[in-house]
Amino acid sequence: MPEPEEKPASAVPDHKLRDARELRDQADAAYARGDYAQAAELDRQIVELAPDSEPGGEARKELVNLRPDRVALYSGLFAAALYIVGWIVALW
């Protein structure tokens, strides 16, 4: 006679998972309207609430995507510095 399969115990309680999904929906809405600071804050709350869940994994990915791109940032700073040096040389 086959033994009944047991459900694996979730690492995250159901109420926390439900709250994390609600926060995930709010973060998606904030991201869609361009409120990236609010989306990042909600993602941090999700990671604190349910780090080992599906919404927690999505929130970690979103936080990585919301960080500034260092190459673009440094390229812009280099271009601005080059522009300023060009004016200094031209006016000297």
Image (cartoon, helix red, strand yellow):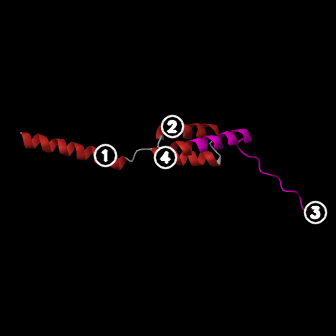
Q: Which numbered disc, 2 or 3, marks the residue that appears first in the sequence? A: 3
Q: Which residue is mark 4?
A: 64
At mark 1, the secondary structure is helix
> Around disc 4, counting alpha carbons within 10 Å, would you say few (fewer than 14), some (14 to 19), or many (20 or more)?
few
Residue 18, percent across and down?
69, 42
Give the amino acid type for the residue marked by disc 4 in the picture: Val
Looking at this view, name the residue that lies furthest to the left: 92
Q: Which residue is mark 2?
A: 38
At mark 4, the secondary structure is helix
Closer to viewer: mark 4 or mark 3? 4
Left/right placement of residue 6 relative to residue 48 reads right
Residue 46, percent across and down?
60, 40
Left/right placement of residue 3 relative to residue 82 reads right
Q: Which numbered disc, 1 or 4, marks the residue that appears first in the sequence? A: 4
Foreground residue among 76 and 26: 26
Give the amino acid type for the residue marked by disc 1 in the picture: Tyr
* Residue name at image x 56 percent, y 38 percent: 42
* Residue name at image x 55 percent, y 41 percent: 43
Q: Give the CA distance from mark 1 to mark 4.
A: 18 Å
* Residue name at image x 56 percent, y 42 percent: 27
Q: Give the CA distance from mark 3 to mark 1.
A: 67 Å
Q: Give the CA distance from mark 2 to mark 1.
A: 25 Å
Q: Which mark is residue 74?
A: 1
> Around disc 3, counting alpha carbons within 10 Å, would you say few (fewer than 14), some (14 to 19), or many (20 or more)?
few
Q: Which numbered disc, 2 or 4, marks the residue that appears first in the sequence? A: 2
Which corner quadrant holds the C terminus? top left
Total labels drawn: 4
Q: Which residue is mark 3?
A: 1
Closer to viewer: mark 2 or mark 3? 2
Give the image quarter of residue 84.
top left
At mark 3, the secondary structure is loop
